[in-house]
Structure formats: structure tokens, C-alpha cells
Image (tube, rainbow, N blue to C red):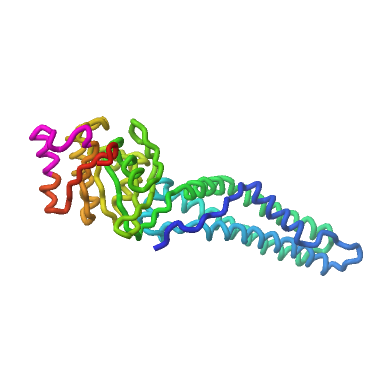
Amino acid sequence: MATLKTPIAPVPTASDFLDIVLSKTQRKTPTVVHPGWKITRIRSFYMRKVMFTKDAFAEKLDAILKEFPIMDNLHPFVSSLLNVLYDKNHYKLALGQLNTAKHLIEQVSKDYIRLVKFGDSLYRCKQLKRAALGRMATIMKRQKDPLAYLEQVRQHMSRLPPIDPSTRTLLICGYPNVGKSSFINKVTRSDVDVKPYAFTTKSLFAGHMDYKYLRWQVIDTPGILDHPLEEMNTIEMQSITALAHLRAAVLYFMDLSEQCGYTVEAQVQLFNSIKPLFANKPCILAINKVDAKRLSDLEPERAALVQSIIDESDGKVKLAELSTYTDE
């Protein structure tokens, strides 16, 4: 399964595209028609110009089409993440428009070369060459929007974290502001933004740590709020994508002190609502901020609610109490 390994070259705007191709034609093909030339030589002179321009357009468009990954060939995690960030259909449409433009330019070149073959004067051949290049340029100008869109996608792809779906992974999830980013800062020595409000983490963040001589990939997901899938925003959908498609051990963070702004009941309810996503994954219930409140400090019925997560899991969910503040 393919992942996004190779960086993609910047996509030029439609006007830059034209400048690159037409200046290349000017540089790489002869520019002067001598007065004594026979008509056959004049025809081949202009036919060469048309063919060279067509090849330059096709080469540049091919390079763009080959560099952008085909969604269906990617690992399901990468494919779903891209679909969340920018709609798969829009992406396919933009690439399809460039492919169509390439075929149209090739057709224009064929038609005009046939006409130049029968040009009966220098003036006629020159006008046909100008018309051919003009039509190719018009086709390219119409690709302004797909090219601009693909450049946006390219910039976004280059900023995606280098997540390897096939390596050992620790996936951290839970409500916003329960201490997920503080934890990843401690274990991976990385620097994730930590602020006292929700959605500080706007996208997936990957760090690495060594444990028992093995390298682990640690992924900090944006906080998930408890509402139906259809109502989730892009930030939350990235977390759901990671939970669904990555083979990983899951750390579900809870804050019993409720400093995060969410009740214990709401945090238990969220765990139960996303539980199907990590049905076959090892899971640890990480009770964070024990410096503020431990499980034993809760009222009996609320403690029983948290304990029910462990009891109902048939031993699949383990409990861990920690504090990223005191390193406990």
C-alpha cells in the first residue's frame, strides 16, 4: 500500500505554465526562415514548432499527473485522511481536467500539422502555426482553477505529518484539553502546542519514542467531541480516520478533575460511543491529572461508572493513572 513519501513539485499557475512552455519552444526550435527556402522546408519548420509545443505541454502535464497520488492506490488511512481534508471527488475532477486538457492539446496539434502539410505559402504556414499555439494556450488558460486547487492540495500534503501506517503506533485520543499534548511532549521530547482551551491540536501530530529498544510512533489526535459522525468538523474527522484505519495501541485520556470542561459522565459516554472504532486494538484508559483528582477520590457511583469501562471490556482495556504535570 502506498503512502505519501515523495514530495510533489510546485504546480505552476496557468499563466506561468504558458510562459514556461512557450519560452521553451522559442529557445529550443529554430527562429529564422531564410528567403530562399522551398515550401517543403518552410512547412517542416512550422510543423516542428507545433509538435515541439505540444510535446512540451504534454510533458509538463504528465509530470503533474504522475506526481499526485491516485487515492485508490493509497493505504486506507492516508486515503481517508486526504478525503477528510479535501474532497476525493474534487481532487479526482481536477486531475481529470488536466488529463483532458493534455488530450485536447494533442488533438489540436494533429489537426494543425495536417493543415500545415498543405500550406501553399510562408504566410499561410505561419498563420496556421500561430492559430495552433493560440488554441493550445486557450485550452491551458481554462485550467486555471484545477491548477490553483492542486497547488493548494500539494501545500497541504507537504504539511501532513509523516505517519507510517505500518509501524508500531501509540494513538492518543479523548476530549479536548485532557492533557494529550502534554503527554506526547513528555514521552517524545517534541514540542506540541499546549493551551488551556479546546482544539489547540488542529491536526494529527506524530512523534517518536523508544521503549524497550523498540521505536514507537506516537500520534496526538485532535480532541473528539461527542456528537454524531455527520456533525463532526474536519479537525474531529481526522481523529476518527486515525482510529478507524491505523493498527495501533489506543490511549484514551480522561480528566476526572473536570478541569478540561467536560464531566466524567460525558467522558465515559464518549469512550462508549467511539469504542467500536478500536474493537480489535489494545486499549489503555489513561486517567490523567491525578495530582488534582484520583479515581479513588471520586464519589462511589461516578467511580463505578469509570470502572465499568474496564469491567465490560473482558480484560481488553487496562487502567493507568498518571500526571503529565508531576510526571507521576
Which one is nearer the viewer's eye here, 103 or 250?
250
| 93 to 322, vertically: above or below | below
Residue at 26% from the left image edge and 53% from the top image edge = 249
| 202 to 17, vertically: above or below | above
Residue 227 in view in this figure: no
Specify whether residue 19 is painted magenta. no
- The answer to which image quadrant residue 281 occupies is bottom left
Q: Residue furthest right?
A: 36
| The C terminus, quarter of image | top left
Name the main secondary structure of what is drawn in magenta: helix
| The N terminus, quarter of image | bottom left
Which one is nearer the viewer's eye here, 211 or 302?
211
Q: Is residue 190 left or right of residue 17?
A: left
Which one is nearer the viewer's eye here, 109 or 236?
236
Residue at 29% from the left image edge and 55% from the top image edge = 248
Residue 239: percent from the left, percent from the top? 32, 45
Which one is nearer the viewer's eye here, 27 or 253?
253
Residue 8: percent from the left, percent from the top? 53, 54
- The answer to which image quadrant residue 253 occupies is top left
Residue 171: percent from the left, percent from the top? 30, 50
Residue at 78% from the left image edge and 67% from the top image edge = 44
Residue at 71% from the left image edge and 65% from the top image edge = 114
Residue 36: percent from the left, percent from the top? 91, 66
| 149 to 75, vertically: above or below | above
Q: Is residue 299 left or right of residue 118?
A: left
Q: Is residue 265 left or right of residue 165?
A: left
Magenta stretch bounds: 290-308
Q: How many marks?
A: 0
Residue 289 in view in this figure: yes
